[in-house]
Image (spheres, rainbow, N blue to C red):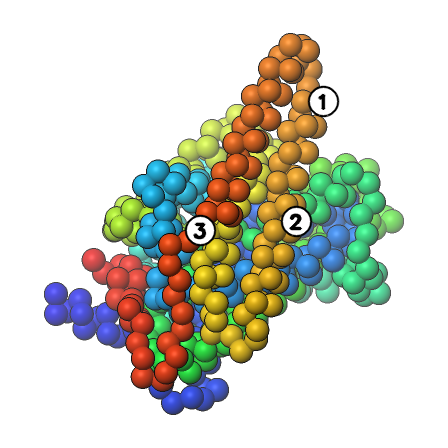
Amino acid sequence: MAAAMEKSNINQIVVSEKKSWKNFFAYLGPGFLVAIAYIDPGNFATDLQSGAQYKYELLWIILVASCASLVIQSLAANLGVVTGQHLAEHCRAEYAKVPNFMLWVLAEVAVVACDIPEVIGTAFALNMLFSMPVWIGVLLTGLSTLILLALQKYGVRKLEFLIAFLVITIAICFFIELHYSSPDPREVLHGLFVPQLKGNGATGLAISLLGAMVMPHNLFLHSALVLSRKIPRSATGIKEACRFYLIESGFALLVAFLINVSVISVSGAVCNASDLTPEDRASCEDLDLNKGSFLLRNVLGKWNAKIFAIALLASGQSSTITGTYAGQYVMQGFLDLKLKSWVRNLLTRCLAIIPSLVVSLIGGSAGAGKLIIISSMILSFVLPFTLVPLLKFTSCKTKMGSHVNPILISAFTWVTGCLIMGINIYYLVSSFINLLTHSHMKPVAVIFSGVLGFAGIAIYLASIAYLVFRKNRKATHLPESRNSQTVETLPRQDIVNMQSDID
């Protein structure tokens, strides 16, 4: 026990009580773990399709989504800093057993749905680098469990540096791809700052791009990661922590934004080149992660395909780590149940590997690519059940460490959140209507499916309305004086222990 406590103290990150810009370096880390979800293989797949089909026209969606993501992620970080509890723990304290259980199930579904693209993306990367079948790559991805176990024992700080290194690696790889593909800078800037949607296909893809940027599991993750720092529990210290976490998140998300812009720009430049072969043009019409590698190899050369594969491998492996952490916090928060990290990681890996393995064996790489799209739809379905509680809890905690008018902050965040939820709901409803109208079922079966489907949509919307209009039990505010203390103190030793695999 003494050894465990000694190791825990080593893993703690202590912030000086003296107000200084140097304290910013103590807060560096969580933002990069969060930014991984914005550059995971699922995002790459959507980016490739966007560039291939619409060149640079949808780049503005990435800009809007990144700005909205910064707002939402800063709320999640502030929630943990101000209250000393993360989002899943607030849900357990706020809701009755049945709603809390349902929210936990949806959160677990989100974690698994996020993990599936990571598994498939890593398998695609192994296929590109070593020419191994996708299904074998899916199995080998399970070895990331052992890698994660080895990394956790070195403490959270080293793990954060590793993730930051992987993010920078991804950025370098795609910046190299950007150099070789040579997109027109004027067209790229036009796509970034001039909104346009040409056709229903562009609208659907824009919704996918926006919906994929804010991941449900990321909100649980960010609100928990900030609890690993030992910050001064005064009004000044909390406000400084919120401000530095905002800056740190902004920098990490800026890197993720540039990577997404690079992926779309590379895809747009390559697929809209005038000297493409008929085979390459056919690949661009239905571009996925696997075809992206072959396309780059044919057009830009063998080494460009290898660079893309290295970036994809770094993305998949780093996403594995953050997804596992999110799963641990979700289970601990909703159920007050703590599992050893290797048990939690094994369960999450199996739940993601089984469907990925089955689909890759039956449908090959094409089927695995479609599974990524299905996972993004599941995440769109789950997002409101994570976003609404976050908005409600942060609205109750009116000050949230900001010097800006709290009413303006609350109004802005609710408008942003409602726009994101509205877009995701529209995407789900329109997809269901398209499925019915283009199905080859008999009229009776279409009517029966429509009745069941719209009844389910009504229940879905009613559940969201319940979360929105339900009155919260209590509010927590910032300490008014420098010496006042909150109920919870930071760092949360159980969070530190969980990150360093000490039980």
Name the front one of labels 1 and 2: 1
Disc 1 target residue: 437
Residues at marks 1 and 2, CA–CA distance in whole angstroms: 24 Å
Q: Position of residue 66 (x, y in %)?
A: 63, 61
Disc 3 target residue: 471
- Ranked by sequence position, the earlier of labels 1 and 3 is 1
Quarter of the picture containing the C terminus is bottom left
The disc label shown at residue 146, or none: none
Indicate the secondary structure of the residue bearing disc 3. loop
The relative height of residue 334 versus residue 68 in the rendered view (above or below) is above
Which residue lies at the image location 64% right of the left edge and 34% below the top edge? Answer: 429
Judging depth in this view, the residue of 304 and 426 nearest the camera is 426
Q: At label 2, which amino acid type do we have?
A: Leu
Disc 2 target residue: 209
Residues at marks 2 and 3, CA–CA distance in whole angstroms: 33 Å
- State if disc 2 and disc 1 touch (CB < 8 Å): no
Judging depth in this view, the residue of 489 and 342 nearest the camera is 489
Q: At label 1, which amino acid type do we have?
A: Thr
